[in-house]
Image: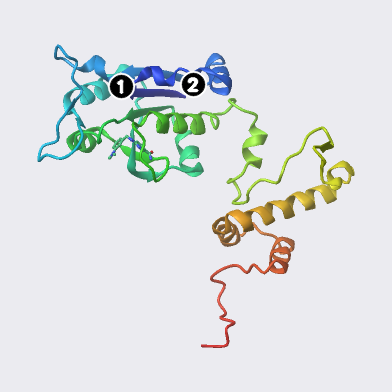
Amino acid sequence: MRFDILTLFPAMFQGPLTESILKRAQQAGKITIHLHDIRDWATDRHRTVDDAPYGGGAGMVMKAEPLAAAIQAVQAADEPGGPVVLLTPDGELFNQSIARELATLPRLILVCGHYEGIDERVRERLIDREISIGDYVLTGGELAAMVVVDAVARLVPGVIDSESIVEESHSDFLLEYPHYTRPAVWEGLAVPSILLSGHHGEIARWRRSERLRRTLARRPDLLARAAAAGVLTKADLALLAEWGWQPPGSGWNTDGHE
Ligand code: 4G0
């Protein structure tokens, strides 16, 4: 898969993209990441990329011409084309299912906005999709683009061990069970004895109940989705009922009224 990143600060990407798994994936030819400095498409002496907003107000807006020229040049530079995605707090909330969808594409073109955003006409004409990594504002789209590249790249076949992808948190709405490695006792804290027992059936049941316990405590919203998706077994539901949890919206009102 090919990633193109349009940014005013290409140097910000040295680090996250040149270390560890993303580095290996690039060396192995599973992914390529192409950085493009939007300022290279500015035409005036000062290489201007932003300007004051029409109508007044705080901050600056990314100018249409350099940004549009950059997007069009990068899109045309190679086959196949790919969707042009703007990272913005106004976008659709990024999640694992969007990451899976994007990982099926041959190419993704990511645009990192700065200042108060980009000229609306570029958004209208050239942006295919707008993604937000969460409900907070960053100084630019770069960190958001890195998050998207990382989450998508690891799903590209051959980038990481495929077993870790199926088993991971969020693929089946339950949080992960707790993990332990040696030593068996650290600072007086023992590893749960079941994990040292060698009883594989009991270990699997313990891990399942820990996943349910954690999801109930931290993300009851996910538990409701797991129930709705039908991924909870009778044993799961019995355990959850012991803890006082009932699938929401399952119908009967038990408060004695209506
Ligand atoms: C475009 C993404 C880009 C518009 C980018 C800001 C947070 C995210 C930027 C704006 C970003 C995110 C309208 C402020 C750059 N901040 N949550 N900052 N506006 O994904």
Q: Is residue 192 left or right of residue 115?
A: right
Disc 2 residue type (three-letter):
Leu
Which tag, 1 or 2, sits closer to the chain's start? 1
Residue 104 vs residue 203, the one in the foreground: 203
Q: Residue at x 57, y 83 (%)?
A: 255
Q: Give the quarter of the image for residue 56.
A: top left
| Ligand 1 closer than 8 Å to label 1 CB | no
Residue closer to the observer: 139 or 33: 139
Q: Helix, strand, or loop for circle 2?
A: helix
When the figure is inspected, residue 92 is found, relative to residue 102, above or below; the finding is: below
Query: What count of labels does the image hold?
Result: 2
Colour setup of the view: rainbow
Taking the image as four quarters, which one is ligand 1 found in? top left
Who's the residue at 57% across and 72% down the image? Answer: 250
Callout 2 crowding tier (Cα within 10 Å): few <14, some 14–19, many ≥20: some
Asked if residue 193 is positioned above or below residue 141 in the image, the reply reads below
Bin the neighbour count of mark 1 within 10 Å (Cα to Cα): few under 14, some 14-19, many 20 and up.
Answer: many
**Relative to 122, residue 43 above or below:** above
Residue at horizontal 18 percent and vertical 28 percent from the top: 63
Q: Position of residue 65 (x, y in %)?
A: 17, 24
Left/right of residue 82 with respect to residue 173 in the rendered view: left
Q: Which residue is mark 1?
A: 8
In the picture of the structure, the residue carrying the numbered disc 2 is 17
Q: Residue at x 25, y 23 (%)?
A: 72
Q: Position of residue 13 (x, y in %)?
A: 43, 21
Is 14 located above or below residue 191 in the figure?
above
Q: Amino acid at mark 1?
A: Leu
